[in-house]
Image (spheres, rainbow, N blue to C red):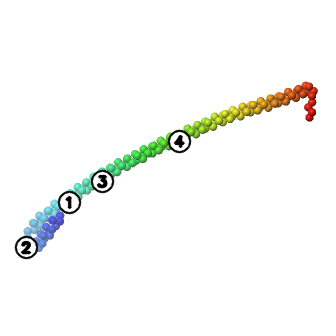
Amino acid sequence: MESLISQFTLLSDHALNDKNFDPSTIEDLMKLFEVEAYRSWAALELESHNEAEEAEIALEEAEEQLESAMEAAMNEFRRFEQEMERMAEEELNSLEAKAEGARKMGTLMEKAATIASKRYMEAALNSATASMKSAWKGISSNKVHPS
């Protein structure tokens, strides 16, 4: 394009100085300007098209990376969720085992208290029976207690 401009400058100077200058030479130069303009426009159009394709490819790569990152995050979340469920299950099982142990201990303590109260009642009943027998013996033998 610069060479065409310098050529146009030379022809313009020549046209000003020469009265017999043929204007068709400038028309030929103008056609060359038009051809060069179309070439530049086509080159810009091609460059724009190539840049658009590159941008599209970059966008697709970014989408793939985003999908990959999202999938990795979801996998990490699933592993975390499974780990939390496993830990919760272990804690629940532990609490259930402790509750069962406490229930059994309560049952044993209840049985021990029942046995102890039965023995206490038997001992009290035996003591009362022995006192009554002793009292009957005293009454039967006509002995009076000194008090």
- Whichever of labels 3 and 1 marks the residue nearer the N terminus, that label is 1
User: Of discs 1 and 2, which sits in the foreground?
Assistant: 1
* CB-based contact (under 8 Å), mark 3 and mark 1: no
User: Of discs 3 and 4, which sits in the foreground?
Assistant: 4
Q: Amino acid at mark 1?
A: Ser
Q: Amino acid at mark 2?
A: Lys
Q: Is residue 49 above or below residue 106?
A: below
Residue indicated by mark 2? 19
Residue indicated by mark 3? 55
Tell me if 86 is positioned left or right of 33 in this view. right
Q: How many marks?
A: 4
Which sits in the foreground, 68 or 39?
68
Q: Residues within 10 Å of mark 1 (few under 14, many from 20)?
A: few
> Which quarter of the figure has residue 29?
bottom left
Where residue 116 appears, x then y in whole percent?
73, 33
Residue indicated by mark 1? 40
- Outermost residue on the top side: it is 140
Give the CA distance from mark 3 to mark 4. Answer: 48 Å
Give the CA distance from mark 1 to mark 2. Answer: 35 Å
Give the CA distance from mark 1 to mark 4. Answer: 70 Å
- Whichever of labels 1 and 2 marks the residue nearer the N terminus, that label is 2
Q: Where is the C terminus found, in terms of image quarters?
A: top right
Which sits in the foreground, 69 or 97?
97
Where residue 137 appears, x then y in whole percent?
88, 26
Residue indicated by mark 4? 88
